[in-house]
Amino acid sequence: MRTLRFLLRKEFLQIRRDPAIMRMLVVMPIVQLLLLGNAATFEIRSSRMYVVDEDHSPASRGLVTRLAASGRFEIAGASPSMALANQALLHREVSSIVHVPARFERDLVRTGSAPVQLVFNAEDGAAAGILRTWAGRIIAAYSAELSGEIRPATATLAGAPVRGAGHIEVRARGWFNPGLDYQAYMVPGILVLLVTMVATALGSMNIVREKELGTLEQLNVTPVTRAEFIASKLIPFWVIGLGVLAFGLTVARLAFGIPMRGNLGLVFLGAAVYLLVALSIGLWISTIVETQQQAMFVTFAINMVYMLMSGLFTPILSMPRWAQWIAQLSPVKHFIVVMRAVLVKGAGLGAVLLPLAILAAYAAIVLTLAVRQYSKRAA
Amino acid sequence: MSAMRGFVVKEFHHILRDRQTLLILLLLPLAQVLLFGFALRTDIQGVRLVVVDPAPDASTLALRSRFTAGGTFRIVGVEATTAALAPRFQAGEADQAVVFEPGFGEKLAHEGQAQVLVITDATDPNTGATMQAYATAVIQRYEQEAAQRAGPRGVRIVPETRMRFNPTLESVNLFVPGLIALVLTIVSALMSAISLSREKERGTLEVLLVSPLRPWEIIAGKVLPYLALGFANVLTVLAAAWFVFKVPFRGSVLLLLGESLLFIVTCLALGTVIAAVTSSQRTAMIAALTGLMMPTTILGGMIFPIDSMPGWMRPLTNVVPGKWFILISRGIMLKGVGLGDLWQETAILAGMMAVLLVVAVRAFRVRLG
């Protein structure tokens, strides 16, 4: 125990002496959190729309007015030329086009039906699909409104209700996060990722650095046991990591107003176990690789999996089955589950017992692997 | 100039001799683009739906079968009241619920108006919004078709929608160009940051600085071999995009290759600057990795649309080189535009490269003093 204390003091001194490390561990995650927390949103603001009205009738103007009045679309340009509209779409000046063909109103009056063309820039993925649905609702509502004013010539028994042809009113409600607030969902996840990235990188460079500098050989001939050695490498970053997480949560609370419905002690219990996993994985890498450069590339590969496959940015449910298994391997995923459940849904210990158990088992396995791997080198 | 040539040859030897690292550098980007290209998608399949239908009738049954028809929805339960919903949502057994009002078909037929309530688990707001839009679209289509069958009653405006540049909303087409930008940014920046900071740490940079080579020659010599390696990466990941993911290449492939080269040089220069301002290999690598990964992913427009960000945030995305490369590669691949439409993005990237190179060379010259 005495040995461990001395080793720890040495590690802490080393970290404190290198201002670059403290900057990366503390300042970088917080600064990135403040910036990225604002940017990580799929929230669809109003779409800039180009209007090509070839009809110039009260009906076509009414349609454009309804689209603009909905707040979902913002008229950013208008001309009778579809070519100009296409150019604007190509250059991302607008993200949608509504094209009302000539004789729109006449067709409505004569045949009771007229087409309207909607073009969306599908470069931004899911947003285009949602905009399409919105536009569809607005147009359907306008049709219903017009039905009261225009009586088409071909209408059968105008005004009389016809079987099955009524209007279905859809009301939508989102549970657990009714305002579709992205920050409550994203900010804790981003914080975890940032702290993990730095911690894994520092951990993975730690032992291999001693290897490269030749000081590991010196340590190997001392009476320091393997467990003491690994512990001395683990504990400082574990303590600092927890500190940064606490600081980050405070910042997230103040800057983004993320909810904290559950017991914070539970979050930190989760964080303590989780950081053990993340740091052990880093140390394990460090015992396997030969150079800091290799350590870095392995860390890069693992951090990419953490970042892109933890379900933070794209849903795990959408991934192919084999990828869902890989996602289960990411400790980040399990900790984000704990954090969200406790902070956003106010869950208690019972609800997060499973992910906590997974993390604990994970920590035990990886730590054992790291200690054993290191002993091989020491032999 | 021959000193320069000798130096470059020596650098190439360095890289070629370390087979293990060379293999990692060649295969890692390809492996990552393949892995994440398959894993990242936003289209949602198999939404678990609970139907609350207090009084089933022809209309509600027809609408229910509409939901199961596409494969997007899977009905996991039919309830008579909404009381059973909350526990099912909390247990995570259901993602969405469609609640019909009592006498739905009757009201629809005779009053011409009926209500449906769509409840969605919005814990993940993105998935929630998409599921909501899917469900609304199904109901809307049913309503339209019913209206068509019933014959004209009142008037109907028929929207014809077109999804320009990515008609099927294929996730792969959106993510692969972004993924390429992300992977190339980090691999290139890491490579040049490592090669320079290692010389610095070992003290061999001092030797180079007192040699007749000028600072820019040292940097060029260090970076050139990695340029070759980076270009090899471009070829492999673009081949993966084309053969594996079938991303359309509507524009000029030659232009795309040229732009990729420009982008790699920019990222290599970025790595050089990072090496110049940090003191050890470890700091340089961690700064390059953690300083670039999240910002490139989030601010580059690869996953989160830049239009969705708050107004003050949007100009900040301009400093991310990946953003410009994503605009260029999506432009060439999906929109089929040429240099005439991309000159602005290209000029910005070239400007970034110039600034970074100047900063890098200056930073190393300062060390001489």
Image (cartoon, rainbow, N blue to C red):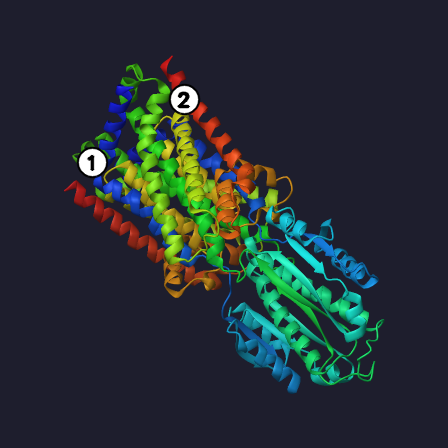
Rate crowding at label 1 as few (under 14), some (14 to 19) or many (20 or more) other CA atoms within 10 Å.
few
Question: In the drawing, what numbered circle is on residue B17?
Answer: 1
Q: Mark 2, chain letter?
A: B
Q: Position of residue A227 (x, y in %)?
A: 25, 44
Numbered circles on residues, count? 2
Considering the numbered disc 1 on the image, is that residue within a helix, a strand or a loop?
helix
- Identify the mark nearer the N-term, 1 or 2: 1
Q: Position of residue A360 (x, y in %)?
A: 36, 56
Q: Residue at x 26, y 22 (%)?
A: B204
In the image, what residue type sits under mark 2?
Answer: Val
Asked whether the viewer can see residue B35, the reply is no
Q: Quadrant of the N terminus of chain B?
A: top left
Q: Position of residue B218 (x, y in %)?
A: 33, 23
Most foreground residue, B269 or B8: B8
Asked whether the viewer can see residue A194, the reply is yes
- Where, by quadrant of the figure, is residue A215 drawn? top left
Q: Is residue B138 above or below residue A323?
A: below
Residues at marks 1 and 2 touching, judged by CB atoms closer than 8 Å: no
- Where, by quadrant of the figure, is residue B210 drawn? top left
Considering the numbered disc 2 on the image, is that residue within a helix, a strand or a loop?
helix
Q: Position of residue B368 (x, y in %)?
A: 36, 15
Question: In the drawing, what numbered circle is on residue B167?
Answer: none
Q: Quadrant of the C terminus of chain B?
A: top left
**Marks 1 and 2, how far apart at CA:** 27 Å
Most foreground residue, B165 or A355: B165
Q: Is residue A114 above or below residue B123?
A: below
For mark 2, what is the residue? B361
